[in-house]
Image: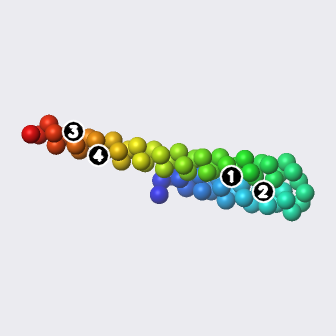
Amino acid sequence: MSEEKLKGLKDEAVGKVKETEGKLTGDELRKKEGQAQGFLGKARAKADDLKEDIMAGADKLKEKFEKDTDR
């Protein structure tokens, strides 16, 4: 698991804690802050997944290109 994915998962978890804290204390700002941090974490994790998919696709394309040029 990459460092960026871990940061994303951490942001999701911390965001959920803040959101729950806000709900329990009636602090709407804290609740919204937690929701925003959770969303940021999900976005960061998804962006890292996309980056990994793109890199894997590029590697496959490179391998195919190298095989084609060896003929």
**Which corner quadrant of the image does residue 71 belong to?**
top left
Residue 33 location, x and y as percent? 77, 48
* In contact (CB < 8 Å): disc 3 and disc 2: no
Q: What residue sits 85% from the left and 48% below the top?
A: 29
Q: CA distance from mark 3 to mark 2?
A: 49 Å
**Pair 4/2: label in front:** 4
Q: Amino acid at mark 2?
A: Glu
Q: Amino acid at mark 3?
A: Phe
* In contact (CB < 8 Å): disc 3 and disc 4: no
In the displayed structure, 69 sits above or below 32; it is: above
**Pair 1/4: label in front:** 4
Q: Earlier in the sequence, mark 2 or mark 1?
A: 2
* In contact (CB < 8 Å): disc 3 and disc 1: no
- Report helix, strand or loop for mark 4: helix
Question: Which residue is under mark 3?
Answer: 65
Q: Amino acid at mark 1?
A: Gly
Question: Which residue is under mark 1?
Answer: 38
Q: Where residue 19 is drawn, which disc sits there?
A: 2
Q: Earlier in the sequence, mark 3 or mark 1?
A: 1
- Report helix, strand or loop for mark 1: helix
Q: In screen coordinates, is 13 left or right of 59?
A: right
Q: CA distance from mark 1 to mark 4?
A: 33 Å
Question: Which residue is under mark 4?
Answer: 60
